[in-house]
């Protein structure tokens, strides 16, 4: 069984074994040939499933396999794929992004720009990409100076989310996705918070309900503010600190773990339910404290592209299920960040 969540112009199909159960969707969205962009790990574990499925549906296809990891989300990989496709693909062909957020962002940007745009189907394979990056249409690549600095919005034609694919994930990568799940719960949904607090989800349990709730929260926000002028900023709870931690650790700390640290910092200072928040972070091995000097944290977090020249935006949650937007000048932000930093290391 699966659920269909409509996000503006496209559907997200969510459910255990959705890949097989919703195969008719896939068929109806591919007009001609498909290039399946994936990475080596996803290819190793899930190549057969996808190959057999596309063969059964009589969809002409081939796999384009990139190295795993953030370093593939770059201009040179983008250029290689574009050159490759330019000799073999046309405007009525389809890009299938089959992987985590790295593949989703890169392949999405390829689809958005190849011949001024071809169809894109997102099939996320990590928890983080299922609950976050595959929904909301952001695509892009990194520059040497920072993450996601080149990109655009590209709606997929279809998104298929099948939590069965999660079983092959490394535990660290699986738990990483919970950084974002906990963010949704703390900011928007007390019931989701109780659900993940009363059950310790593992990659072997059925994640469909959790994923469906998160996708629905994200969809509702994206529908109000796709371009992130207002309420979509709330999805950045914990992210100002998180982006700085990712950068300062040279990306050895993955995004979800960094977000969890950001949540821990913000909740300890502002949230009346902090002990519950900490308990949930601990359940998912997401309570690690990172120790970088406050001045470095401040400098790097100011370079977050979500800030403007004079204004820093912080998302505050004062109790589980609620959040609000706080806009600060740099001086006030420096003072608050100092307090948060001191508080978390106390
Ligand atoms: N577009 C957006 O809105 C958005 C939102 C959040 C994050 N992101 C981006 O997402 C990226 C991070 O995504 P991620 O956390 O999915 O990381 P990732 O894509 O690097 O995947 C993490 C690791 O898991 C492996 N993997 C993926 N699926 C697997 C599976 N089913 N079984 C076994 N191994 C598997 C990958 O090979 C990789 O080694 C970052 O580049 C970030 O900027 C984008």
Image: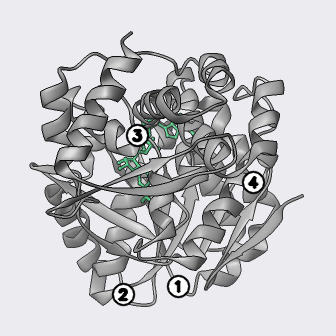
Residue named by callout 4:
213
Quadrant of the rendered image holding ligand 1: top left
Q: Residue at x 50, y 76 (%)?
A: 225
Q: Earlier in the sequence, mark 4 or mark 1?
A: 1
Q: Which SS class for mark 4?
A: helix
- On screen, 204 above or below 162? above
Q: Residue at x 50, y 26 (%)?
A: 268
Mark 1 vs mark 2, CA separation in Å:
9 Å
Place of residue 167 in the rendered image (x, y in percent of width and height, measured from the top left): 67, 32
Q: Colour scheme of this structure image? A: one colour
Residues at badges 1 and 2 in contact (C-beta under 8 Å)?
yes
Instruction: Give the side of residue 17 with respect to residue 346, left or right.
Output: right
Q: Which SS class for mark 2?
A: loop
Which corner quadrant of the image does residue 55 belong to? bottom right
Mark 3 vs mark 1, CA separation in Å:
25 Å
Residue named by callout 1:
32
Task: Tell which tag, 4 or 1, sits nearer the viewer.
Answer: 4
Q: Earlier in the sequence, mark 3 or mark 4?
A: 3
Q: Earlier in the sequence, mark 1 or mark 2?
A: 1
Quadrant (top left/top right/bottom left/bottom right) for the N terminus: bottom right
Task: Tell which tag, 3 or 4, sits nearer the viewer.
Answer: 4
Give the farthest residue toward the right: 1
């Amino acid at each position: 069984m699966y659920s269909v969540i409509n996000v503006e112009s496209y559907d997200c199909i969510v459910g255990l074994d959705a890949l097989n159960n919703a195969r008719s969707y896939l068929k109806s969205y591919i007009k001609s040939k498909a290039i399946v962009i994936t990475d080596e790990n996803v290819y190793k574990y899930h190549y057969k499933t996808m190959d057999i499925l596309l063969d059964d549906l009589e969809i002409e296809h081939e796999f384009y396999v990139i190295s795993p990891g953030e370093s593939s989300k770059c201009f040179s990989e983008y250029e290689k794929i574009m050159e490759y496709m330019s000799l073999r693909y046309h405007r009525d062909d389809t890009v299938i992004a089959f992987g985590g957020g790295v593949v989703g962002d890169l392949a999405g940007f390829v689809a958005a720009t190849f011949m001024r745009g071809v169809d894109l189907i997102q099939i996320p394979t990590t928890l983080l990409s299922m609950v976050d990056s595959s929904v909301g249409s952001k695509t892009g690549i990194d520059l040497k100076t920072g993450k996601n600095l080149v990109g655009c919005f590209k709606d997929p034609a279809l998104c298929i989310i099948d939590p069965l694919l999660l079983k092959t994930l490394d535990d660290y990568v699986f738990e990483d996705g919970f950084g974002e799940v906990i963010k949704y719960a703390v900011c928007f949904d007390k019931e989701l918070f109780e659900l993940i607090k009363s059950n310790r989800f593992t990659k072997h349990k059925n994640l469909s309900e959790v994923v469906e709730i998160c996708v629905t929260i994200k969809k509702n926000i994206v529908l109000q503010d796709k371009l992130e002028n207002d309420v979509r900023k709330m999805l950045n709870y914990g992210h100002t600190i998180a982006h700085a931690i990712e950068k300062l650790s040279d990306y050895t700390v993955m995004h979800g773990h960094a977000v969890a640290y950001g949540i821990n910092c913000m909740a300890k200072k502002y949230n009346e339910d902090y002990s519950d928040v900490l308990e949930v972070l601990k359940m998912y091995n997401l309570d690690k404290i990172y120790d970088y000097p406050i001045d470095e944290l401040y400098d790097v977090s100011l370079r977050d592209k979500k800030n403007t020249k004079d204004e820093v935006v912080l998302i505050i949650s004062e109790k589980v299920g609620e959040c609000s937007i706080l806009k600060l000048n740099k001086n006030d932000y420096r003072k608050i960040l100092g307090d948060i930093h001191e508080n978390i290391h106390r």
